């Protein structure tokens, strides 16, 4: 583990611009601290509708100010980081922020836009979850700033009736990799058959930044979990199982990604385009534009301590 001073020294020595949300080198995922969750619950009591409304407002603000990209960046092509997984037919475990949804066209399935797609850091302790990645660190395996996942490639989302996804949600997935030919005729790689293991928001202890007690490459929350919350109709995509899908899933010996990928079935889908957030609208968003126009020195001082905290509760209550 390296402290903050040594990280700053590395930036200066290599003349690298310090990672921040403003240069899209620091990737955060939707997070609500235990303290904020308790205050939210205490304020609204057992009123599930008000709590759902509060979470959705927190999600939207977190998305426009923190978890979504605020500058245009080029897609990483051909994503050679995925080639090794493809060659070995080995699955990847990834994390991303839910972005947009494109609607199906004729027989062509819709696509799900993922922001800040990275190989998930697998912690030994099950209650440690990383809520931020510094993608300039060699130990961080960033796949792409944005990537499309074909909805028809989603094979499983757990033992529940449906899976709701809203823009700004964090998604943890497992995927096989598939190869395709890009517009220049070169081999490229992307996500294939996919399991959505968890989605919603990360809840855990607040991340305290100091020089000794955190890893600047992976911002980690303790006593954390992923919460699949009540979207209260604000989801942009709802996934469900068809009867055929359930029959095939129940006959499987193990729900591993290889076996799921070889089974031919599709999930039910409900798209709500009115609940999406277009990428170009996101970049033009006034909140993001104001942040992006901050003086450069202010950019350099941004860290997780500036994430919306108490203000989320005040805005949403």
Image (spheres, rainbow, N blue to C red):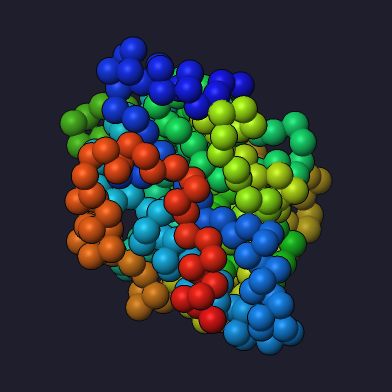
Q: Residue at x 30, y 22 (%)?
A: 16
285 lies left or right of 253: left
Q: Residue at x 20, y 61 (%)?
A: 284
Quadrant of residue 242 within the rendered picture: bottom right
Q: Nearer the viewer, residue 204 or 227?
A: 204
Quadrant of residue 117 within the rendered picture: top left
Q: Nearer the viewer, residue 39 or 161?
A: 39
The reply to whether residue 230 is in sight is: yes
Could you tell me which quadrant the N terminus lies in? Answer: top right
Relative to 237, say whether 82 is above or below: above
Q: Residue at x 36, y 21 (%)?
A: 11
Relative to 96, say whether 60 is above or below: below
Relative to 133, say whether 273 is above or below: below
Could you tell me which quadrant the C terminus lies in? Answer: bottom right
Residue 187: horizontal and vertical position, in percent? 32, 27
Q: Residue at x 48, y 18 (%)?
A: 6
Residue 239: horizontal and vertical position, in percent? 56, 67
Q: How many marks?
A: 0
Quadrant of residue 244 within the rendered picture: bottom right
């Amino acid at each position: 583990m390296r402290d903050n001073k040594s990280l700053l020294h590395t930036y200066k020595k290599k003349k690298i611009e310090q990672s921040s949300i403003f240069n899209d080198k620091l990737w955060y995922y939707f997070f609500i601290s235990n303290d904020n969750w308790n205050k939210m619950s205490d304020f609204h009591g057992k009123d599930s509708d008000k709590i759902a409304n509060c979470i959705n407002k927190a999600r939207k603000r977190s998305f426009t100010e923190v978890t979504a990209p605020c500058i245009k960046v080029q897609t990483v092509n051909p994503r050679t980081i995925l080639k090794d997984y493809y060659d070995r037919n080995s699955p990847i475990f990834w994390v991303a922020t839910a972005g947009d949804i494109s609607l199906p066209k004729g027989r062509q399935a819709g696509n799900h836009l993922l922001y800040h797609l990275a190989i998930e850091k697998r912690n030994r302790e099950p209650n440690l979850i990383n809520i931020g990645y510094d993608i300039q660190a060699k130990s961080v395996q960033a796949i792409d700033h944005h990537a499309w996942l074909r909805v028809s490639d989603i094979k499983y989302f757990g033992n529940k009736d449906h899976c709701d996804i809203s823009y700004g949600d964090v998604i943890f997935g497992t995927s096989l990799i598939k190869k395709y030919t890009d517009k220049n005729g070169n081999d490229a790689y992307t996500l294939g058959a996919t399991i959505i293991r968890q989605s919603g928001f990360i809840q855990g202890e607040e991340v305290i930044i100091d020089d000794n007690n955190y890893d600047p490459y992976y911002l980690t929350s303790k006593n954390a979990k992923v919460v699949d919350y009540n979207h209260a109709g604000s989801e942009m995509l709802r996934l469900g199982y068809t009867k055929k899908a359930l029959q095939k899933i129940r006959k499987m010996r193990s729900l591993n990604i290889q076996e799921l990928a070889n089974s031919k079935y599709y999930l039910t889908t409900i798209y709500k385009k009115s609940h999406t957030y277009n990428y170009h609208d996101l970049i033009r968003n006034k909140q993001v534009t104001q942040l992006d126009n901050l003086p450069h020195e202010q950019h350099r001082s941004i860290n997780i301590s500036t994430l919306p905290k108490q203000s989320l509760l005040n805005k949403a209550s």
